[in-house]
Amino acid sequence: MFRTLISALTPGRTPPARPLPFDLLTEPTVSSLAARPAARIIDSFECIEGIPVPDWGAFSDWLEDLAGEQMRAQAWSEAEQIWLAHLGIALGPSYRLARQGDCLILSCMADRQLTSLFDFIRCKSRQITRLLDGLAGQPEWGHAILIVFADHESYYRYVSRYYPEAGEFGLSAGMQINAGCSHFAMVQDDFSTLEPTIVHEMTHNCLSHLPIPVWLNEGIAVNMEAQLCRSALTDLGPQQMREKHQQFWDEARIQEFWSGQSFRRSDDASLLSYDLARILVARFSADWPRFRAFANAAQADDAGAASANEHLEIALGTAAMAIIDAPKQGGDWHPDPARWPALTEPGGFVLQPHGMWSSR
């Protein structure tokens, strides 16, 4: 021990570096992947504003010709790494692709930051799975993928293609994108700011196998943030929020909530939608076995109304009116899909942005 101490303190001698708790996919590793059959995904890249975008549908069709589930899973995993390596090159030389277990992170983060981030993801993943008992699912293939952009400009350049062409949308801090290859996208920030966003998006990922309505998906994710990160949607007090809810919601606007449209608006509708979803989920999930049955059976096409009637023995419109304390003569607040606009995403994919809110 004494010799080790003297050696460490002797000028001119550098103690051996500790091995990193994750792997960096360096150029030789990527080159070896380029020789694999999965490298055919490069042939289907479309360059959009300098960003390589694979045709995951075409690649999935090619996978069907492979013999055996194991070969298809391996090819998909390799394709994800090849895509992220090319994306990193397109974003700039400061981006690095790191891997730990089944998690991939593309970012500009330093080693210490990456180590903390991997530790955080591993810990929160276990907690989310435990708290979502009977609801959480994990994909059979591929990695958990996190793309951390160095600045907002790069982030919005990347995520803009996943928004509808028309309309105004609120700012976002992160996004779960289920476009062929499910992944999280977010902006690098102070780690304490990043934590709630990661928990929010990880929750979405765990729920992505369920065809649940947007309000239920977002309500669960926001409540998970509050439990695991002690985060809050806004610094407004309960009375102020109650007044905002009462002033905003009516028979027509509540249909935007049930359809999911109000979560994307750039005005107070987004904040109030997330808060209403949070309260509904908090109240319904107090009886977890009944809530679990409800969530597993809920369908987006009716906002979960039929499942709520069966498993919670409550009408969703009645529950929303009670929370907001809407007047009894306020009209019909029950989900009415016939009044919803057509809500489709590019390629039919699901878009669930995690918003940024202000009390102003």
Image (cartoon, rainbow, N blue to C red):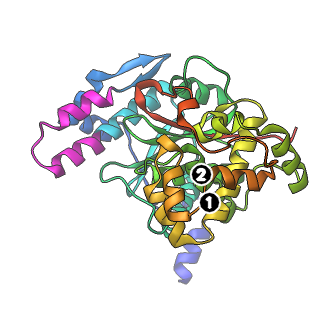
Q: Residues within 10 Å of mark 2 (few under 14, many from 20)?
A: many
Give the image location of residue 108, x and y in percent. Answer: 56, 39
Instruction: Check if mark 2's residue and mark 1's residue have beta carbons within 8 Å.
Output: yes
Residue, x 67% and y 64% (percent of image)? Answer: 283
Pick whichever, 88 or 265, lies toward us. 265
Task: Specify the quadrant of the image occupied by residue 151.
Answer: top right
SS of the residue at dot 1? helix
Residue under the image location 32 percent in, 31 percent down: 56
Q: Amino acid at mark 2?
A: His
Most common SS among magenta residues: helix
- Kind of residue sitting beneath label 1: Met
Q: 9 or 224: which is nearer to us?
A: 224
Residue located 57% across and 60% down the image: 120
Is residue 151 visible in this depiction of the protein?
no
State whether residue 100 is above or below residue 47.
below
| Residue 3 visible in image | yes
Q: Which residue is mark 2?
A: 200
**Residue 68's spot in the image, x, y percent?**
12, 49
Residue designated by label 1: 224
- Picture coordinates of residue 4 (x, y %)? 53, 76
Q: Which residues are magenta?
A: 55-78
